[in-house]
Image (spheres, rainbow, N blue to C red):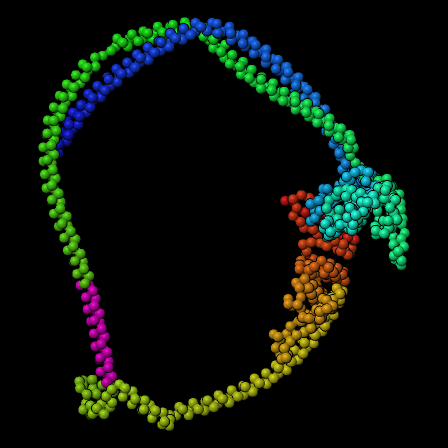
Amino acid sequence: MQSLEATSKKVFELEEQFSSAKRELRRRLQEEEARVSRMKALAESIADIEQEMADLARDKSEEERVRVDLQQCNQAINRIQRERAEADIFIGSRQRESTVLVQQMMRLQDVSNQRMELLRRRSREAYEATLWLRQNEGRFKGKVYAPIMTQIDLLEPSDAKYVEAQIPTNDLVAFVAERQDDLNAFLTAMRDTCNLSVNGVVMPSESLDAFQPRRPLSQISQYGFRAYVQSLFTAPDGVMRYLCKRYRVHDIPVGSAATEDCLSQLRTLGINRFFTEENLYTVRVSEYDPSRFSTMSSELEPPSLLIMSVDTDTLEELEQRKQVLSDEIAAKVAEGRKLDSEERCLQQQQEELRRAKKRLLENAGRPRQLSILREDKQATLQTMESAAIDLDEVRRKTLCQQQETCACRMVQVKTLTETVMLCGETSRARAEHRLHMMTASADQEKAEGMLRVAEQQRFSLQVALEDLQKRLAAYQREVLVKRHKAQEATKCSSTTKQIPPELVKEFKRLPKTAKEVNNQLLLEEQTLSCMLPVDASVEREYWQCKAAVSRLEQEVAGSEQQLSLARAEMAETGARWLHDIDNLLQRVNRSFGRFLCELGCLGEVSLNHSPDPSQYDKYGVTISVKFHDETPLAELSAIYHSGGERSVATVLYIMALQEQTTVPFRVVDEINQGMDSDNERKVFEMMMNTAAKNSAQYLLVTPKLLPDLPYTEDVTMLFLMLLDSPITEGIDVLAGAPVGLLGDTQHLHQNM
């Protein structure tokens, strides 16, 4: 093995020597190629330097041209900047003028603020209520409109007198709500919280399409009518529906001066109310004689609430002036954009000229630098040309060295081959020896396994043998015991080994099979049972049983007497209990009936029991109520009564039951669950009255408090709330203003 390793190492060294010579040749070839490339690059660089020196000679005239172009470009930029500044000044002046015009137009168009100012002068309370409504619109489920006069927009200001003549002043300052509950909440808040008295109306349920004039305008236009009052103004849908429903603005025509000449004809058309140019006419028909008419006319008064209108002429003039200014500004802006574009182009040209000038100035000393650089590169090129090598000589020397290395390598490879063959034979012998060892080891393991199996079988057989020996010993002992019993039964001595002859004869007479033996035993037992007892203990047992029976009969008689006394006592106690229960339920029935009578209903409480009075688990209380006139008095159940009715009946029954006892205080939690608003208020009022009459103190826990409950002076309200900020509006927001409440109310705030 050592000679093999030494030979392999020598072969490897020869291979490395051959590769090293090859790499050295390649390196020298690459160095020569790099030298030639560098020489070529130096020659090209020298040519470029000479070309650049020729170009620099032509830059003298170019520098003067760049200076003149740059001066002209600067003058053009200054001119454009002056024109751009003048355009900016012009645009700023026109924009300020346009802003003034817009402010004037906004003042002319600001009818809403003017109307609010007029509303403040005419009705301070309606004005303050409108301001409160703007801040609290989210508190209502539907829309609540500000006073009608602020919602109406006249198409022509001259028509205001017709609208004011048709709609009274009180309704022009009235609020309109889409929902009745929102209106009630709004008026309550105004009255109780803000101490304001305002008018409010509810929008009708009919849609706006349901309000159509009885006669189309085309049928009555020949009499000088030009429009209906509804078409003279615009308003929100809810406000317009109320005005159509209440004041029929959709059916009141407005005429002209020509309508005055057609009054006699209008009477026959059935138009009961209409306007002419300056008058309001009302036609009434006699209830007794429909052919008789009476006409009343009144002169229209100048409008006082809908007088706010826009000066359209001035507004149009301002709009035209604003449009002229906008056009002038747009023209100047376009001119400014054009100047900006020209300035950007000139600035780009200026920047290019500056870069060219800078480049020309930098190139002033460039020829001297290029001359020195050219001389250095030429010297380097001459040095590289003198450093050339003979590549053919280098290749020849390298080839000779490689041939010598190959010859030595062939010798070493031959030696290595012989050594490898010898090692192969040795390895084959070792492998065969190892195979024999593995086969022997496998046979040994197989024999050891068979030995372990045989050992386990021997152990199992030994255990089975010991078990059989134990069973044999047990059977032998059992045989000895049975033989001893047989000897005793046959009255033979223990030394007797055989059965006596007389017993053999006796056994021969007995049955031969087990079934016959069992039948014979059964027959003998039946015969024995038919024989009279002759034992004295049986007679003693008889007299003992007789004495025990007599004693038990005496105990039963005593128990029956005690049972009779107990039944009599139970009957007396049950009668007293039933009498007390009847009296209690009668009092509860009277209180329960009185409570339901106060609600406008009927009710009674009765005792319910089974036909057998002793079945006390069958006793119960029956509550019968009648909430409606058309329904009979029926037992309270989920089938015939709603959840609210059952809640009311249960609460009143508990109150009637509580009146029969006197306690320091009572706690009632969420008594109003499941009740409608009417029964809820009645039950709360009844609870307040009961608390005032009874000496017990009532503690009512409820998630909400009904407004305007009749509180007494000694009622205390505790408000427990979880708030993000303290209440600043006061307790009125929560509880309204009931009598006797504010003086004793306490607040408990928990700020989170």
Q: Is residue 583 left or right of residue 556?
A: right
Number of marks in picture: 0
The image shows residue 147 at horizontal and vertical percentages of 77, 44
* Residue at horizontal 77 percent and vertical 53 percent from the top: 738
Residue 321 location, quadrant: top right
Q: Position of residue 163 (x, y in %)?
A: 81, 43
Residue 463: image x %, image y %?
21, 66
Q: Quadrant of residue 678?
A: bottom right
Q: Is residue 473 magenta?
A: yes
Residue 524 placement, left or right of 743: left
Q: What is the span of residues highlighted in magenta in the rendered image? A: 458-486
Q: Is residue 94 above or below residue 732?
A: above
Tell whether position 320 is magenta: no
Q: Residue furthest front?
A: 222
Image side of residue 474 versus residue 215, left or right: left
Vertical order, 4 against 505 (above or below) = above
Seen in the picture, residue 92 relative to 738 is either above or below; the reply is above
Tell me residue 365's x, y (percent).
44, 5
The quadrant of the image that shows the C terminus is: top right
In this view of the protein, which residue sits in the foreground, 12 or 751? 12
Q: Is residue 545 visible?
A: yes
Q: Tell me if I can see residue 699 in this picture.
A: no
Image point (30%, 89%), residue name: 519
Vertically, is 320 above or below 401?
Answer: below
In which image quadrant can residue 631 be found? bottom right
Q: Nearer the viewer, residue 515 or 162?
A: 162
At 17% from the left edge and 85% from the top edge, which residue is drawn? Answer: 497
Q: Nearer the viewer, residue 540 or 352?
A: 352
Report the quarter where the N terminus lies. top left
Main SS, magenta region, reads: helix
Residue in the image at 18% along x and 58% along y: 452
